[in-house]
Image (cartoon, helix red, strand yellow):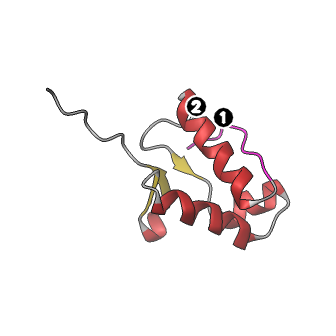
Amino acid sequence: MSARYQFSGTTAVTISASIESGIRTGALPPGAALPPVRALATELGVSPATVARAYRELRQRGVLATAGRHGTRVRPRPPVAAR
């Protein structure tokens, strides 16, 4: 789990940016599990709908993958094609 990473933000945009920052720095490696929507919403003091919107935007961009009750995880980076 991503217990070491400190999520931040109060809007869907800032929460998304926080998650992307964690991915860029390697604090959230491919396959890392993100907290459930309600748990992160409670931690950040925001509505669950705000966290759900952030997750949805990142999912649509291919950054996160969800598997129902198995949670939301950072997607593996796509392989780089050899030239």
Q: Is residue 31 left or right of residue 20?
A: left
Image location (x, y in percent) of residue 83: 14, 26
Q: Does the magenta stretch include residue 8?
A: yes
Tag on residue 4? 1
For the residue pair 39 and 26, the one nearer the viewer reads as 26
Local crowd at mark 1 within 10 Å, few (<14), some, or many (≥20)? few
Q: What residue lies at 42% left-to-right and 55% top-to-bottom?
A: 62
Type of amino acid at the residue the image marks with label 1: Arg
For the residue pair 22 and 69, the one nearer the viewer reads as 22
The image quarter in which residue 13 lies: bottom right
Q: Is residue 79 left or right of residue 34?
A: left
Q: What residue lies at 71% left-to-right and 60% top-to-bottom?
A: 12
Q: Are marks 2 and 1 in contact (CB under 8 Å)?
A: yes
The magenta segment: 1-9
Q: How far apart are marks 2 and 1 (CA)?
A: 8 Å
Prevailing secondary structure class for the magenta stretch in the rendered image:
loop
Q: In this view, does 2 lie to the left or right of 6?
A: left
For the residue pair 68 and 16, the one nearer the viewer reads as 16
Secondary structure of the residue carrying tag 1 is loop
Image location (x, y in percent) of residue 67: 41, 65
Of callouts 2 and 1, which one flags the residue occurring earlier in the amino acid sequence?
Answer: 1
Type of amino acid at the residue the image marks with label 2: Ala
Classify 51 as above or below 21. Answer: below
Image location (x, y in percent) of residue 25: 57, 28
Tag on residue 54? none
Local crowd at mark 2 within 10 Å, few (<14), some, or many (≥20)? some
Q: What residue lies at 58% left-to-right and 61% top-to-bottom?
A: 55
The image quarter in which residue 53 lies: bottom right
